[in-house]
Image (cartoon, rainbow, N blue to C red):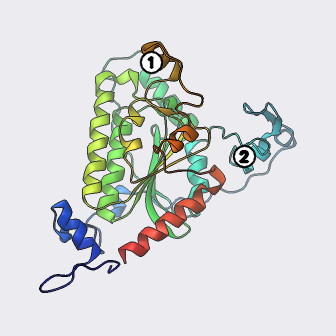
Amino acid sequence: MGLFKKKDKNKSMSFDEIIAKEDGVSISDRFQDDEPDIDLDMVLGKPEMPEKKRVISEAEKSENMTCSGCNAEIPVIEMKRNLYVCPKCGKHHKISARRRMRNLVDPGTFRRIKYETPFVNPLDYPDYEEKIEGLKEKTGLDEGVLSGVGEIEGHKAVIAVMGSEFLMGSMGIAVGEMITRTFEIAEKMKLPVIIFAASGGARMQEGILSLMQMAKTSAAVQRFSTKGGLYIACLTHPTTGGVSASFATLADITLAEPGALIGFAGPRVIEQTIGQKLPEGFQRSEYLETHGYVDEIVSRNDMRDELSHILSLHEKRRK
């Protein structure tokens, strides 16, 4: 790409060649502009068309919700239009994975990664399968993460959004597999990865197998990084437990929404363990930004523009 040159006896080295040499890999191992060696129709669904606007009833127009930040009564229709950010105090309320994805990607560009992981119940947990099937029907998700390929203001990326509405976005075998596939497909397609993390941690119904997903997803990030891929993590409320201790905090660029709870164990557990009072705002995104854990706090309404800007810079670097 020629941003920086290094003198050599025979030729000058490009910036990518210098980095590849320092990493101990050949430039051919890094991202190139070759065609992907995968059949996209085998791993991706058809482009999802924008949902048709439905007529809003009078009852829905008059329905209100109470903001947990300022206790103001806000019309639900206004909260939906503002992506569930309180217009009075800026409190970021939880938002579904499908709504977040729909408002993030360009209409008609999203292709969902096909879900192929069979259901398992390693602990024979009572009613576990029935609960999963019920959540699939209720949320429209195959599991606790929605992943696919889409464009953000014309910039293509592989995007995964965890859904706190699906068992608190907990990471079990299926979620771990989907996150891993997200990085693998991005590597094959030479695309950046964007992940919106929202999770209560590992899924207790799957025991030790859920904890193994921490190592599996972390390894996927490492392989992707070694190949020169760009990984952007967007931490939302809450990002805790095994997710925060694995792939969610291994990104090249870490963004966070305002007021998000980010950490491994909860503040109450930590205080009881160490026998000390924690600092004000501990484990909130603002505190973590101050201490260098988060690169930037971005409001939900600005996230699409911010990601588009980062992706555009990345594309220029690769040229």
- Looking at the rendered structure, the kind of residue marked 2 is Lys
Q: How many marks?
A: 2
Image point 58% across, 59% down: which residue? Answer: 304
Mark number displayed over residue 80: 2
Q: Quadrant of the C terminus?
A: bottom left
Image quadrant in which you'd find residue 230: bottom left
Image point 38% across, 17% down: which residue? Answer: 125
Task: Give left or right: position of 78 versus 105.
Answer: right
Q: Secondary structure at mark 1?
A: loop
Q: Nearer the viewer, mark 2 or mark 1?
A: 2
Which residue is at the front of the view, 18 or 235? 18
- Is the residue 145 above or below the residue 209 in the image? below
- Is the residue 147 above or below the residue 28 in the image? above
Q: CA distance from mark 2 to mark 1?
A: 33 Å
**Could you tell me residue 96's position as x and y percent?**
59, 41
Q: Quadrant of the N terminus?
A: bottom left
Q: Is residue 34 visible?
A: no
Residues at marks 2 and 1 touching, judged by CB atoms closer than 8 Å: no
Image point 87% across, 39% down: which residue? Answer: 62
Q: Which residue is denoted by mark 1 in the rendering?
A: 127
Q: Is residue 229 visible?
A: yes
Image quadrant in which you'd find residue 229: bottom left
